[in-house]
Amino acid sequence: MSLSTPATTTDLRLAKRMSRLGTETAFEVLVRARALEAQGKHIIHLEIGEPDFDTPANVVSAGVEALQQGYTHYGPSAGLPELRKAIAEDVAKSRGISVTPDEVVVVPGGKPIIFFTMLALVEENDEVIYPNPGFPIYESMINFLGAKAVPVQIREDKDFSLDVNEVREAITDRTKLIIINSPHNPTGGVVTRRDIEDLASAIGDRDIMVLSDEIYGRLLFEGEQYSIASVPGMKERTIILDGFSKTYAMTGWRMGYGVMRPDLATHMSRLMTNSNSCTATFTQRAGIEAITGSQSEPERFNEEFKKRRDVFVKGLNQLKGFSCRMPHGAFYTFPNITQTGWPSKKLADALLDQAGVAALSGTAFGAFGEGYLRFSIANSTENLMLALDRIDQWTKRNL
Ligand code: PLP
């Protein structure tokens, strides 16, 4: 074979649906940032949504011990019974509802719950209401399945909570699923108990399911985390998505879960059998320790994020052309940058290339993200201050 022979000689006859699959820009920006680092540039990483803390030592030890004890084989598709039990008890306590282990499905991360919920429930031409700006995987999966993506704008003037009237107006006879996410990525907005109750009454007795993405539920700085599953009558219409990635700094372990009516859990478990077989068993053993062991590390993470949020938001508000609301949860800030006169993507690119600060364009989270940037605060206070300083210098040179 000569060196000039192309690696492939036949056409790739990709399934049409692949053209409808989106992506998560954070990973692409990370690759670009790494390429700049390879050229010797110093980059402050505020693009990726993962805690900068290490997994708590007790959880790591539980994982290592599990490996040594032989948890290296397949396990049940829906998860180890002892982990499902621990999750059921934890969710029951935190949401004030009754949960049995057969309502819990353990999967490799929070993301598969989004994928599987939609695979199990959503058909072509069904309508799915979802937050925009919002976690990009929602829109990607809705389009992938050939359903109709119905965005509901998450508005700054509503403090980035959910506008329930807009949801009410968006509901039609074809609405199959409503996705909510609180605390919200990318804005840090939190939906109040009142809005959750209003949303439940807007749904009424319609046959609509709710995917309630509560992955940042423990990362709350003020206010109350209230699940729609806690509203009387809503539990059987809700799929709670939660997991270990954010709360316990376990992004790389790949473990999350869904809580749902048992009949749906059986189907979700079949989807697991068909795709992953099971979540890694030693990871699940570590998950038991995460939930039932000391909570001092996750509490420390929260306190640290809160401190960083306070200083970073204060700093953002001093930058020319930036104004930023105080996020109430998660570890993101979502400043409005319209006064810079720059479009979001162009500004994010310029900050990366010229100021060495990696952030995401608001449009990475949907069309309604135009006019905003997302900065993760999952980096040290020192680096956050340095990033503010670099952006300040940049704005002085360019605005
Ligand atoms: N849901 C939201 C809102 C997220 O921001 C993320 C991760 O960024 C996930 C789900 C998925 O988390 P995991 O890494 O556990 O798959």
Image (tube, grey):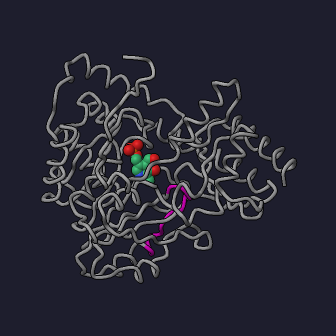
Between 168 and 340, the one nearer to me in the picture: 340
Q: Residue at x 35, y 22 (%)?
A: 61
Q: Residue at x 35, y 47 (%)?
A: 110
Q: Work out which quarter of the rendered image holds the C terminus and state it.
A: bottom right
Q: Which residue is drawn at 49% across and 29% down?
A: 54
Q: Is residue 91 left or right of residue 393?
A: left
Q: Position of residue 348 (x, y in %)?
A: 67, 49
Residue 253 visible in the picture: yes
The quarter of the picture where residue 232 lies is: bottom left
Q: Position of residue 213 (x, y in %)?
A: 38, 57
Q: Is residue 285 left or right of residue 381?
A: left
Stretch of the chain drawn in magenta: 185-195
The quarter of the picture where residue 145 lies is: bottom left
Q: Which residue is drawn at 23% across and 66% down?
A: 123
Q: Any magenta on residue 188?
A: yes
Q: Main secondary structure of the magenta part?
A: loop
Q: In this view, does 3 lie above or below 266?
A: above
Q: Where is residue 16 in the image (x, y as percent from the top left)?
A: 31, 55
Between 201 and 323, the one nearer to me in the picture: 323
Q: Any magenta on residue 156?
A: no
Between 210 and 371, the one nearer to me in the picture: 371
Q: Which residue lies furthest to the right in this view?
A: 396
Q: Is residue 381 above or below residue 330?
A: above
Q: In this view, does 256 lie to the left or right of 131?
A: left
Q: Position of residue 359 (x, y in %)?
A: 63, 46
Q: Work out which quarter of the rendered image holds the N terminus and state it.
A: top left
